[in-house]
Each structure stands twice: as structure tokens, then as C-alpha cells.
């Protein structure tokens, strides 16, 4: 969704995005496997959903698996794939009680069949829920998303549906995954790095960025509220004065 200062509700955070980094380091510190670290990370995602719902945040987008994560060991990739199915089995009822709608963004073509089934079932069964939309970026890459949008727009141009010199930012945004979602107001990255790592490249244009050393499984209510307080103190200008 394309936004400007007028269309934004200044100060109110509608859309929070999180790069959940640090599961591996969290596990290493405790002499546990990376898989256990990811499992604790998934449990913390459940906690974050409840915290966001209590704080009346409407959209929460999290980076769970990037297009680059295939480079990890087969064991770790397999564990992350299994985790998504386990997560929805374990928390389906609670997500329903909390009124949480699920949406997945990313390339589904090369995912295992059980993951595609989980994703489709979670989206279909939750589509009428309204309290919070949890958007999970899974096999997601920002550059790939932009290229896919360019590809589908070029087909429309070739078909004569639009003229190339009529193309606008709004039209482009309509071809991205989150065309009906306001752009993120705040992007939080745990684990101390200061990079976007190919996350929501288009949508992050005017987002505030907040990096915290805390490792993802340890990111709780106090850390979330510190990020939200920091956000409130920032004066957002959207390129104006
Ligand atoms: C980066 O931390 C984290 C990931 C690649 C995976 C994030 C996944 C989860 C939190 C689980 C999500 C679960 C569901 C159900 C969607 P890292 O392991 O690279 O940490 P490190 O930098 O300390 O090694």
C-alpha cells in the first residue's frame, strides 16, 4: 500500500514488522542445538502475537525463512520446515480464540507439500478473523517480490491493459504481496545486526528501524514496550519538513 503523511495516523503504530534473529546464538549459549533455538523462537512468536493483540497492533509481519536460508544445513532447513507445521498444530486453537488471521508471503513453489498444506489451511480457516493479522514471510525475499511484481506488470503492458508510461507507484504496489496492508511503521531487528537482509524492501521505504541486542527467544513484553516507546518519540516526516 502506498502511503504519505496525510494517510498515516501519526504516532499510532498499526503495522509492526520483526526480523527474528538470534535463535542460534541463544541456543549456543545454553549448549543446545540450533533446532531447539528455533523452537524457542517459535514459542516466542506465539507470545508476541498475544502482546501485539493486547496493544491493539493490527498487523504483525515476521521474517521466518528467507530465500537465502536454503544455504543452511539440510538438517536446519528441515527443522524449520517441520516447525511451521508443528506451530500451527500446537497453537491453532489459541490463534482462533485470539482472533488472529494468518497470511503467508513468499515463494510457495519449492516448499514441501506438508508446508504448502499447512499454509493454505491456516489462511483459509482464519480468513474472517479480525483482531490481528499475523503475516509470516516464509521463503521470502524482497528483491524476488519486486521482480515478480515487475514480471506481472510487464505482462499487463504487453497485453495492452496498461500503457508503460502510465505506470505509477500505486499500480506497482498493487502487484506486491501486501497490497491491502499499510506499510510497516516500525521494523524491529533482534540479535544486534543493523541490516534489512532483503526483508520488505519496498514496504520499508519510510519505516522506522529499531535494532536491539536481545536475542529473539528473549524478546518479551519489556523489550517490545521499549521499542514502542522509542517509536513514539520519533518524529516522522515522510520526506517532508
Ligand atoms: C535467524 O536466527 C532466525 C531464523 C532463520 C529463523 C526464524 C524462525 C523462527 C523464529 C521460528 C518461526 C516459526 C514459525 C512457526 C513461523 P539465527 O538462527 O540465524 O540466529 P543466529 O544469528 O544467532 O545464528
Image: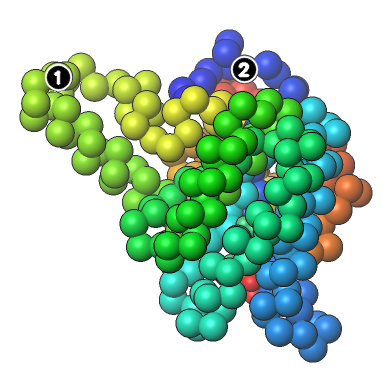
Residue holding disc 2: 8
Above or below for 209 versus 28:
above
Query: Which numbered marker is on residue 224?
Result: none
Q: Residue furthest right?
A: 222
The x, y position of residue 204, in whole percent, is 53, 39
Ranked by sequence position, the earlier of labels 2 and 1 is 2
Mark 2 or mark 1: which is in front?
1
Front residue of this view, candidates 233 and 224 = 224
Return the residue found at the far bottom.
Answer: 31
Label 2 close to label 1 by CB (< 8 Å): no
Describe the colour scheme in one phrase.
Answer: rainbow
Give the x, y percent position of residue 32: 77, 85
Q: Residue at x 43, y 50 (%)?
A: 106
Q: Secondary structure at mark 1?
A: loop
Tell me if mark 1 has few (under 14), some (14-19) or many (20+) residues whose alpha carbon lies within 10 angstroms of its own. few
Q: Is residue 103 visible?
A: no
How many numbered callouts?
Answer: 2
**Is residue 52 rendered to the left or right of residue 119?**
right
Nearest to the observer: residue 126 or residue 222: 126
Which residue occupies 53% across, 18% down? Answer: 4
Quarter assignment of residue 206: top right
Q: Quadrant of residue 232?
A: top right
Callout 2: helix, strand or loop? loop
Viewport quadrant of the C terminus: top right
x, y percent for residue 131: 73, 28
Residue at mark 1: 161
Q: Judge whether 104 appears above or below 194 on screen.
A: above
Q: Nearer the viewer, residue 183 or 40?
A: 40
Q: Is residue 165 visible?
A: yes
Mark 1 CB lies closer than 8 A to ligand 1: no
Residue drawn 34% across the image and 51% down it: 144
Residue 183 in picture, x, y percent from top left = 55, 31
Amino acid at each position: 500500500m502506498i502511503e504519505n503523511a496525510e494517510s498515516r495516523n501519526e504516532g499510532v503504530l498499526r503495522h509492526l514488522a520483526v526480523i527474528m534473529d538470534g535463535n542460534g546464538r541463544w541456543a549456543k549459549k545454553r549448549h543446545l542445538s540450533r533446532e531447539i533455538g528455533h523452537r524457542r523462537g517459535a514459542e516466542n512468536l506465539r507470545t508476541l502475537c498475544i502482546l501485539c493483540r493486547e496493544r491493539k497492533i493490527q498487523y504483525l509481519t515476521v521474517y521466518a525463512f528467507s530465500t537465502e536460508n536454503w544455504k543452511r544445513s539440510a538438517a536446519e532447513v528441515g527443522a524449520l520446515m517441520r516447525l511451521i507445521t508443528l506451530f500451527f498444530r500446537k497453537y491453532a486453537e489459541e490463534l482462533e480464540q485470539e482472533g488472529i488471521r494468518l497470511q503467508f508471503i513468499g515463494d510457495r513453489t519449492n516448499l514441501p507439500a506438508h508446508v504448502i498444506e499447512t499454509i493454505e489451511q491456516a489462511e483459509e480457516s482464519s480468513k474472517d478473523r479480525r483482531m490481528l493479522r499475523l503475516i509470516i514471510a516464509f521463503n521470502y525475499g524482497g528483491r524476488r517480490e519486486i521482480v515478480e511484481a515487475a514480471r506481472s506488470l510487464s505482462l499487463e503492458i504487453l497485453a495492452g491493459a496498461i500503457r508503460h508510461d502510465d505506470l505509477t507507484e500505486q499500480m506497482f504496489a498493487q502487484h506486491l504481496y501486501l497490497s491491502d496492508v499499510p506499510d510497516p511503521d516500525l521494523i524491529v531487528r533482534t540479535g544486534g545486526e543493523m541490516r534489512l537482509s532483503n526483508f520488505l524492501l519496498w514496504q520499508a521505504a519510510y519505516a522506522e528501524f529499531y535494532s536491539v541486542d536481545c536475542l529473539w527467544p528473549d524478546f518479551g513484553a519489556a523489550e517490545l514496550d521499549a521499542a514502542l516507546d522509542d517509536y513514539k518519540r520519533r518524529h516522522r516526516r515522510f520526506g517532508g519538513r
